[in-house]
Amino acid sequence: MVIIEVLKCQHCGAPLDVTPEDIIVVCSYCGYPNAYDKVFTEENVFFVESLPKSEILRRFRERIAKDPDYKGIRDKIEVVRIEGFYVPLWAGVVKGRGNMRYLIYEKRGNSTRAVVKFKKFEMESLVCVPARRSVYDPAVEELALRLERYGYLSFEKIKDILRYVMDVKPIVSLTPEKWESLELTFLNSDFGKEHAKMALLDRASDVAKQRRVPEDVELKFFKFEGDVKELALVFYPLWKVYYDVEGGTYFVAYDGHSGREVLAVEPVRLWRKVHYALVSLIGIAIAGFSLAVYGNSSYWEALANAGKGATALFLLPAVGAYLGFELARGYGKKVARDVRVEK
């Protein structure tokens, strides 16, 4: 006879729907995060204390009072919903190495030549990735980025690094009684440790490319390989304040532990659209003036007598036209938008 053990919620006693990769199982009936693998969770699964909802609301009101974008519409703003979540983040210490090949352009006399450069590097970094892939949330992505640490890490154990970075507490210290006092919902992880290691290595490769590749070079080859020395699952608090104003709904996301803004999606006011339109018109003017130079006979006479500087003189209007076009295009897009994202 086969005996099947049914895992039950520590808080309400309801049966838990678990998979072999689950570390924390959030009860689908009451929402309590059950840590049933005690050996693993005491060392590798943590949560971070959160500010109360009232403090988040106070910070939102303070933001509205100080932000010039809300001048004239502050009385029309109505908070419609405040949501608090413990979002799962996989954090890992990645030690890696890599090499790259890129081109730089060196000027010697009147000529410019392309030079191939090779570079090797090593890195050690704390990287974070959201543990929920099924739903994309820009606020969660931004939160994970802000918790990363690159370069020299002072501690050997990931739990000590995390305590220094974000003041984590073991998930096993979250008793059912303490959970009752929380105002946030726990969200479950979509994937386990093995997938997390691959995601952390991908993120570490991106970090290495951002940090190690020199600016203004033409990258030809980049390779990164490394190992995840340690990893942990961290439940981090994130608050979102949704509000209505002038017929639209917007939100501000807050780091639940520090109270700092993570991401804001807010209305674009008329005065800001006018500003965008004026900058766009300036860009059009710059592009038009630069191109008009090519139709001026005096310009071609000056170019014929420029000697060694002829190439630079010929390219200068083209560069001006390109910059003006990009300015007009970038700010022209902003004119059409009704919302803007602030990080």
Image (spheres, rainbow, N blue to C red):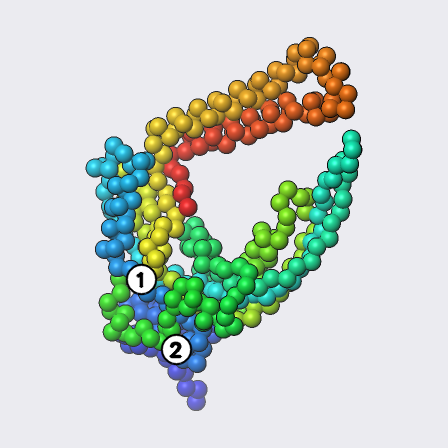
- Element at badge 1? loop
Disc 1 target residue: 50
295 vs 305, nearest the viewer: 305
How far across and down, in percent of the image, does residue 55 sit?
25, 55
Q: Is residue 75 above or below residue 135?
A: above
Which is nearer the N-term, disc 1 or disc 2? 2
Residue sitting at x 52%, y 29%: 327
Disc 2 target residue: 36
The image quadrant that residue 66 belongs to is top left
Q: Is residue 309 left or right of residue 319?
A: right
Label 1 packing within 10 angstroms: few (<14), some (14-19), many (20+): many
Q: Is residue 133 above or below residue 241?
A: below
Residue type at the position of mark 1: Ser
Mark pair 1, 2: CA separation? 23 Å
155 vs 206, nearest the viewer: 155
Label 2 packing within 10 angstroms: few (<14), some (14-19), many (20+): some
Residue type at the position of mark 2: Tyr
Can you name the residue that lies furthest to the front here? Answer: 109
Q: Is residue 224 left or right of residue 259?
A: right
